[in-house]
Image (cartoon, rainbow, N blue to C red):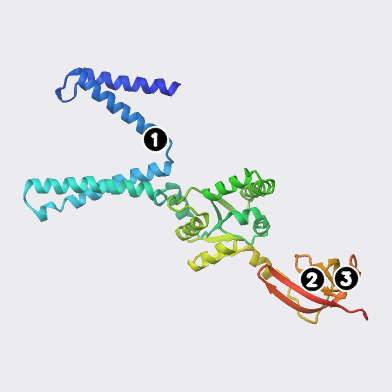
Amino acid sequence: MGILIFRVLIIASVATAGYFFPLFGLPGFTSAGIGLVLAAIIMVLETRIRKTQFKVIWGSTVGTFAGVFLGWALGAVYRTITEDPKTTLFIRAFFLIVMPYIGFLVGTRKSEWLDPAYLFRFFREKSVGRTFKILDTSVIIDGRIIDLCDTGFIEGTLVIPQFVLKELQLVADSADGLKRQRGRRGLDILNHLQKSSLVSVTITEMDFPDIHDVDSKLIELGKRLDAKIVTNDVNLNKIARLQGIAVLNINELANALKPVVLPGEGMKVFIIKEGKEKDQGVAYLDDGTMVVVDNSRRLIGQNIDITVTSVLQTTVGKMIFGRYNEDR
């Protein structure tokens, strides 16, 4: 209510000024009417500006001023084209109208190019040799990124895009209980990372309104920042690498760190359930690797010594096949 009264006072003041100080010698009431219309237009623009993100306002302002300067510079070529006064005035007016218009549109639609936070923060950090790693929603919810950061294997600056936070918030507010739990877990993980003294976490406002797919936005952001993408998403992994973006896949790292097992080696396992085939038992190693053991169905709930017969590498990890030797 207070802002509405303030706006009415401003409009009335401008109209009063137009009445007592007529424009271009016009009658007082006519000048007051013009002032009233101009003040109303300013108020409409003010309400639109307040709803606009700062980076868009900044980009449009810088783009417009750059367009004015470029238009003035290009308009100066009139002297080399013609000596006709009307033609020269048209050339100058043309560039002074068109170039600010182009600058305004470019600054509005590509405001991330001129985002002061991006320009000053990111370039300053790169100058001291830091690298950027962009986290996607899947790797945040997964949670293992915390362990990697706490052990010091992840260095540089972790970048959390605002559009990833928005997607995470939508998951946390989901009507589905499981999704809601995963989303809240992701928010807790981000909170932990921000409090960690071993990594630097920054949230960037950079966005790409023309791109609606989150994966495509991550790839575009990776190109802009010359950053790596940390993800567990197989499709994002493939598409990013096709476009020349370096990818850190935590699932691939986990598979690479699993112990190497060769056929003929022995190991001790705990049989927890029966397998699909006759007389098979199933065990799991500490890292989650499944071990399928022949001749062990009757030994469920026991620790036994087995001999590895083969190792199968799948898209989700390794499977170890072994045999229980009864004569041992």
266 to the left or right of 101? right
Instruction: Return the residue nearer the eye: 73 or 108.
Output: 108
15 to the left or right of 253? left
Instruction: Name the mark on residue 236.
Output: none
Tally the marks.
3
Quarter of the picture containing the N terminus is top left
N-terminal of the pair, mark 1 or mark 3, is: 1
Instruction: Return the residue nearer the eye: 147 or 104.
Output: 104
Q: Residues within 10 Å of mark 2 (few under 14, many from 20)?
A: many
Q: Residues within 10 Å of mark 3 (few under 14, many from 20)?
A: some
Res. 21 visible in picture: no
For disc 3, the marked residue is 297
Q: Residue at x 30, y 26 (%)?
A: 39
For disc 1, the marked residue is 48
Where is residue 261 shown, x and y percent of the image? 75, 76
For disc 2, the marked residue is 291
Q: Residue furthest left?
A: 84
* Marks 2/1: CA–CA distance: 63 Å
Circles 3 and 2: CB atoms closer than 8 Å: no
N-terminal of the pair, mark 3 or mark 2, is: 2
